[in-house]
Image: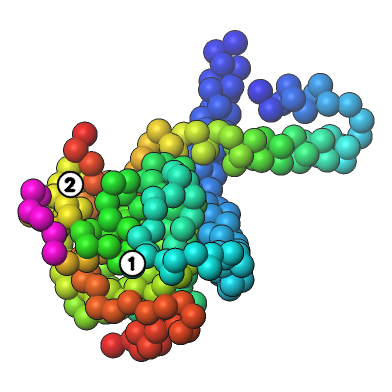
Amino acid sequence: MYGLWWRVLPGPWWVRVLISLVVAAAVVWACFEYLFPFIADHLAINDGTVDGQ
Amino acid sequence: MIRRAVSVVGELLVTAGVLTLLFVVWQLYWTDVTSGRAQAATVTSLEQQWAVPATPTPTPTESAPTVTVDETPPTGDAFAIVYVPRFGSDYAVPVVEGTGTEELKEGIGHYADTAMPGEVGNFAIAGHRVTYGKPFNRIDELRNGDAVVVATATQWFTYRVQAEEIVSPKQVSVIAPVPDQPGETPTQAWLTMTACHPKHSARQRYIVHALLESVTDRADGPPASLAAVG
């Protein structure tokens, strides 16, 4: 998977590393902003309220 | 072919592992950073608003009525600040109306339909014990007699801790107008704090009850109860 990724990237090795880092950063950002908050709201492992339900 | 498939599955599993670790970092560390920052900003802006002499009241009409009963603010609005000397002299967390998932990210949540600060009944509030600024992280360190001070736009309310208990998440009687005695008519002003227990778990709830000791005007400055830690 990552081998294929490496082969389809253009340019010399340092350009490929740079592109990979940028993409990785974008993935982490998307996780922090959207994916993780969405998951956390459905996990409710830290709910501190009392209710009758 | 099989070797190829195994290697792809392996890489996917490693990726999933890394993402899971990232989630833990985000939940336990990053939410504290972002929510902590936002909550501190809310406290600052509330303090600034309250410092400004309330809009020049053009009311030379018949002197205002008796007690100022705070009206319930819209869900999500910050309307008070909680100070707990036991948690440190810099501890100040906003109280927002409502106890939904979103409200508890903004600060301490006020249970809808429970009393307002200082009111006879039970001013019931919930806070995260971990994550999202973790306002009630050290709730288990509170001892009887400790001060919990609530500030509103006009007044300071000092409550003193009377009791702690650990209950099931379904035990709503802890936030009854008379704590643990649903149906009774209240004659005293209580404050009840609820947080998850044990830490990192939603199995039980840690409850602290405090009783109103004194009320002072905001104009008179912070009450003495803010300073001392027993």
Q: CA distance from mark 1 to mark 2?
A: 29 Å
Q: Chain of mark 1?
A: B
- x then y, percent, for residue A31: 60, 37
Q: Give the left or right position of residue B223, taking residue B178 as reference.
A: right
Left or right of residue B148, residue B43 in this image: right
Residue segment shown in magenta: B182-187
Is B178 located above or below residue B111 in the figure?
below
Instruction: Tell me: residue B174, above or below residue B228.
Output: above
- Which residue occupies 33% across, 67% down? B67
Q: Quadrant of the C terminus of chain A?
A: top left
Q: Main secondary structure of the magenta part?
A: loop
Q: Position of residue B184 (x, y in %)?
A: 7, 53
Callout 2: SS? helix
In this rendering, the answer to whether B8 lies above or below B66 is above
Q: Is residue B185 left or right of residue A52?
A: left
Front residue of B36 and B111: B111
Viewer can see residue B3? no
From the image, tell me which residue sits under label 1.
B67
Question: Could you tell me if residue B163 is visible in this image?
Answer: yes
Residue type, mark 2 in image: Val
Label 2 Cα crowd, 10 Å radius (few <14 / some 14-19 / many 20+):
some
Residue A32, located in which quarter of the rendered image?
top right
Q: Measured from the top left, where is residue B43 in percent x and y?
A: 54, 65
Numbered mark located on residue B55 in the image: none
Give the residue at x 24% y 46%: A50
**Does residue B92 show up magenta in the picture?**
no
- State which mark lies toward you, 1 or 2: 1
Q: Secondary structure at mark 1?
A: loop
Label ID, residue B172? 2
Residue B207 horizontal side relative to residue B85, left or right:
left
From the viewer's side, name the closer residue of B67 and B210.
Answer: B67
